[in-house]
Image (cartoon, grey):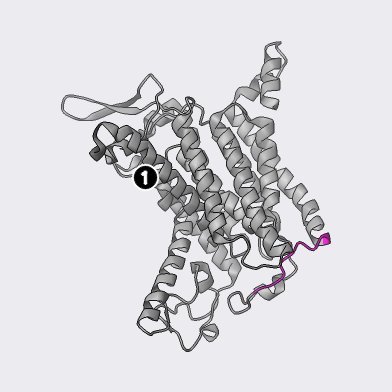
Amino acid sequence: MLYYLFRFLEQFGIPGSHVWGYISFRALLALILSLVISAWFGEKFIKFLKNKQITETQRDAKIDPFGVNKIGVPSMGGIIIIVSILLPVILLGRMRNIYLILMIVTTVWLGFLGGLDDYIKIFRHNKEGLPGKFKIVGQISIGLIVGLILWLSPDAKINENLAIQKQNGTEVAVKHRPESVKSLKTTIPFLKGHNLDYADLMSFCGEYKTAAGWILFVLMTILVVTAVSNGANLNDGMDGMCAGNSAIIGVALGIFAYVSSHIEYAAYLNIMYIPGSQELVVFLCAFIGALVGFLWYNSYPAQVFMGDTGSLTIGGIIGVCAVIIHKELMLPILCGIFFVESLSVILQVYYAKWGTRHGVKQRLIKRAPLHDTFRTTDDQLDPNIKYLFKKPHKAVHESKITIRFWIVTIILAALAIITLKIR
């Protein structure tokens, strides 16, 4: 709203009104504003949650040795994150931008889905929360909506990057096509040109390969949104863990969004130019500020938990943003922590089932998801179960585990960025 107000005032020569046209100004202002809102509103909201007894009611001491002290800590703190993102974005963003609209819809949709899950857990005293099938349907639905809109919207276009070569084959420059077009191409690391066309993967469909490519793209969008939101949800098991990792990932995505919206930087990195994606920088700066402000209360020892309200929303935001800027195939690197956490659960379940079919009680690691394994001692394990990997034998304090996971995410984020120059 403020963006349109000051751009209107600029026509009358109002001093300082021109700065609202700069993406850097609005992005940094969104970062500061979201951080302030998160810190200020967070304190008020935590008091409200305590007064209404919207708090953690049970903890499994066998899994979380430090968790018994967390009973009574307010939950549903993800509302703090959502409010701190949406207010600066609505004030400072260009609300007619299709990408910004998709990010807002994703935030509200998954925030409602996660909030419903937390509501059932807290007010209905059902620790299972929203049945898994309904949660999956909600995630698939928003993935389907995003995929279809990116397919059908005339505003979702790119300028393809082209390498200009000399006769001897030496690459000398990268140019972009002058026209913006609908495209099924996405960025893939390590390959020359950095582009993978979904239509090429469906070439066996002959003359229908483009339509089949769009169907594949929509299915990929659904997969990405569902996988990343579930990964973030699994990663939310320790104080500050998910918020810290997601803020780091948000910084990397912000860099990707900015260089994708700047034709010179896009040419330097040999990636596609995406007109309008600069508004995602405003959103991601608000996202980062909201998470950093939330960490003021969520870092160890936590004064509030984000709950599924926050974790599902965070994961969805990351997934949708990556799809919009055509960087979804880089998420296994960038969101490596989320990927490993999800993989640890899947492997643990299948390894246990495989053992059951052969009459053996077994587990792959001590606990799943992976971060739980590091805070579990050998004394806490069931002596009747065989564990393939039992290290570490002593419990590591959760604050140390959290910071080490942050460090790994920083390394992965840096690696994801530099892959654009490795080809």
Point out the residue furthest to the bottom here.
383
Identify the residue at image location x=79%, y=63%. 53
For this view, does 357 lie left or right of residue 92? left
Residue 379 in the image, given as x and y percentages of width and height: 54, 86
55 falls in the magenta region: yes
- Write the residue at 38% across / 29% down: 267
Q: Is residue 92 left or right of residue 160?
A: right
Location of residue 299 by image quarter = bottom right
x, y (%) of residue 200? 27, 37
Q: Residue at x 52, y 46 (%)?
A: 141
Q: Is residue 347 above or below residue 201?
A: below
- Residue 225 is situated, as x and y percent measured from the top left of the image, at 49, 48
Residue positioned 55% across, 45% down in the render = 317
Q: Which residues are magenta?
A: 51-59
Quarter of the image where one finds residue 264: top left
Q: Position of residue 260 (x, y in %)?
A: 45, 32
List the residue tagged with mark 1.
419
Q: Is residue 154 left or right of residue 188?
A: right
Q: How many marks?
A: 1
Kind of residue at badge 1? Thr
Q: Is 297 above or below relative to 388? A: above
The chief SS type of the magenta part is: loop
